[in-house]
Image (cartoon, rainbow, N blue to C red):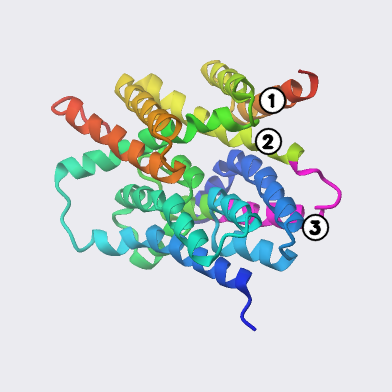
Amino acid sequence: MNDHSFTKGAIAALPLVIGFLPVGIAFGIIAREMGISLFYSVLMSSVVYGGASQFMMLNMFAKGLGFFEIIFATFVINFRFFVMSLSMNQLLKKVPKRWKTLLSLGTTDETFAVASINNTKPNVYYLGGLFLTSYVSWILGTLTGALLSTIIPSNISESMSIALYALFIGLLIPAVTTSWKLGLLAVMSMMLNGLFSGWLLINSGWSMLFSTLLGSLIGVFVFKGGKQHD
Amino acid sequence: MIDSILLIILGMSLVTMIPRFLPVWIVERFIMPAWVKLWLSYIPYAALGALIFPGILTIEGGEPWIGLSGGILAACLVLLRLNILFVIFGSVITVILFKTFL
């Protein structure tokens, strides 16, 4: 029974793996091109496990920026995981704390989205399968890219980043067709993010965090008293 | 000698991992009001919106319509109730075709 859930979680990770592998490969290639060793490239993907921040690190490293600038920018970009982990924690009420802690370390935009949507109360084995498969695919992608950096040009692998957007769209649309409120929330959050990052030129990490918090908060007040989504 | 890249990696790891696990440890110490729980339940949908837009426009630098076309095609395939894997492949092929031939 439990093995069955683990396998189901691993299968649910498949669309995510299709996105993670090429982006991981792109990261591995670019990291090697920047002169970062194979070991450090793979180590970064293993202990940081945050695509946007890792690409940003390469960019800042290439510009010669130092330790504190890079660490602070990473914190800013990845602080959204706090909110995602907080939201996901609500789904895991009865799970033992050590498991929750372990799972929380696998929080990414993609794992959070797959775990939260279409799955009102996911169990710990399902999440284990989903999170572990995703994590391994990110590391394997990086390793492949770092090994083949002289053979594959990074731009081919990069154009596959559309895969992750297609995954997000595939998660969002079925949810919003069942409830127009959720669609309105998502659109408001998109507009806020466009406004903050495109017009006010706020750092993309903060922008995404604020628009997520505000977009969902608007929902609380606008839809108050209405049918609660659960 | 202390390796600066290793220090950067470990520092990045620390500031990324702490926000991830902190909620698990603080949630048990507070009783959350109902409206906060409701707020948290809306977060996945708002987050998906913010993750999609405007990031999807930046897939190909200077050519926002490439990402936009891939996204619109993905949305159409989803509405046709195709499996998510077909949706992903469809959008990837669209983007590759646009980049190759236009």
Residues tagged 2 and 1 counted as in contact (Cβ below 8 A)? yes
Q: Which mark is residue B95?
A: 1
Q: Secondary structure at mark 3?
A: helix
| Dot 2 amino acid type | Met
Q: Secondary structure at mark 1?
A: helix
Magenta span: chief secondary structure? helix
Identify whether A211 is placed above or below B18. above
Can you see residue A22?
A: yes
For residue A128, side relative to residue B93 (left or right):
left
User: Where does the magenta region start and end?
Assistant: A132-154
Q: Residue placed at 36% from the left, 30% from the top?
A: A192
Kindly identify which chain the residue marked by label 3 belongs to: A
Q: Please tell me in which quadrant of the rendered image residue A222 appears.
A: top left
Q: Nearer the viewer, residue A2 or A118?
A: A118
Within 10 angstroms of label 2, few (less than 14), some, or many (20 or more) residues?
many
| Dot 1 amino acid type | Val
- Residue A113 rendering spot, x and y as whole percentages: 45, 40
